Amino acid sequence: MNRRAWFARTATASAALPWLTAPGPAHARVRPRPAGNGPLKITDVKTILTAPANIRLVVVKVVTSEPGLYGLGCATFTQRARAVETAVDKYLKPFLLGKDPAAIEDLWQSNFVSSYWRNGPVLGNAISGVDMALWDILGKRANMPVYQLFGGKCRKAVDTYRHATGMTFAEVEAAARKLIEGGQRYVRVQVGVPGQSTYGAGGVPKENTGEGANARPQTWEPRAYVRTLPKLFEHLRKQLGDEVELLHDVHERVPPILAIQLCKDLEPFKLFFLEDPFSPEDIGYFEKLRPQTSTPIAMGELFNNPNEWVGLVSNRLIDFIRIHISQVGGLTMARKVAALCEFFGVRTAWHGPGDVSPVGHAANVHLDLAVPNFGIQEGRVFNQAERDVFPGCPELKDGYLWANDKPGLGIDLDEKLAAKFPISDDPPFDYRWGNVRRKDGTVVKP
């Protein structure tokens, strides 16, 4: 058979079988568009706001001209959910209608400069929601999971850490033991300090309770916290041993000089990492910190701008990049960050708390599976309402998150059910962050 005849025969077969099926994700085949439908276009972009776990979530849905083909992305900025909704519905949607959803890089770049002022969390989350949705669409068109589009799996599943909290050392120990018995090998520990609110400890003094913008301030004194924390780790190492990996989040709540001392004081207890010892405004202190301690450092939860992390990575001043993928612009940007980090020995540890939607968690897992310099992933157990609203949530088993092998991100959204869990607009954002103060009334970074 000559080449001309072979091409003619192949074209005839393709016309007869417009959707080529795949034997499995590892051998997926691209499914060509049916002839005569014209080029694929974006026909609608919308936000879905829902709170199945009482946390305001923002999900973006990008709809295409192909019937039934759409993508989902996470745009959750829970303290400013309505601002992100407006950014998507009023500004990005008109900009995107009629464009090619496969032009992912070009759409990211043009979305990024479309508002002129950029690098903020509202625009970042809006762009991210669209970007993840476009990768989801591409995976569905290719009949492949998104991790295959990124080059395939580097590991079978994603190791995670979860949180053990309490107001006393004994409570933290008990919570950690429960997680370890459930298969966790990495545990983040947070403890309360008597008489004040400590980030992540799950307790607020009675005198600090209240609601809304005029809620009474939560008291926070950094020196009491810095004195307490090494004692917690000394207790846990004695009781839990050295096999479990322990982590802690400072959450930028102490002055930089105290954070440096804390990193040094924690060295004997061999943390897996200490997170956010400085605020983004104080990243210049990392040059002072690195020569003084061997405690591994994770940083980046609040980052928006590449200028915040490029120097930290290229100068090897941090050990784990901790960015919130929906805040920095989605999978397109996060892939570039991971590639940069690979060359400088920095590992990934994407932000993954409850205020990341299940769609965002699915995106985290797909990227975790595909990057060689994966470090750890903040884990999440989804409640039944979340599972019902978002069919296809990643599964947490034996301390690992597992992605399914469905095309795209492998997760869907039941919009009718999501509407049964409306977000609360009262208060319109989490006022507690702005009500953490020292005893003299000085505001504390959250």
Image: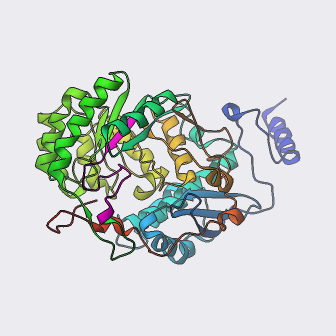
Q: How is the image coloured?
A: rainbow
Q: Residue at point 21% right, 35% down?
A: 231
Q: Quadrant of residue 22?
A: top right
Find the magenta span and give its range: 187-207
Q: Is residue 388 magenta?
A: no
In the image, taking residue 312 as reference, residue 171 lies left or right, namely right
Quarter of the image for residue 432 reads bottom left
The residue lying toward the viewer, choosing from 180 and 70, is 180
Q: Farthest front residue?
A: 206
Q: Position of residue 322 (x, y in %)?
A: 36, 45
Q: Position of residue 309 (x, y in %)?
A: 28, 49
Q: Nearer the viewer, residue 418 or 48?
A: 418
Residue 365 horizontal side relative to residue 172, left or right: right
Q: Residue at x 26, y 27 (%)?
A: 270
Give the residue drawn at x 37%, y 49%: 323
Question: 43 and 375: which one is in front?
Answer: 375
Whether 399 is drawn above or below 416: the answer is above
| Residue 193 visible, this orientation | yes
Q: Quadrant of the N terminus?
A: top right
Q: Main secondary structure of the magenta part?
A: loop
Q: Position of residue 69 (x, y in %)?
A: 72, 58
**Is residue 188 on the magenta stretch?**
yes
- Height in image: 253 above or below 241? below
Q: Quadrant of the C terminus?
A: bottom left
Task: Give left or right: position of 104 versus 333.
Answer: right
Is residue 374 among what the camera can see? no
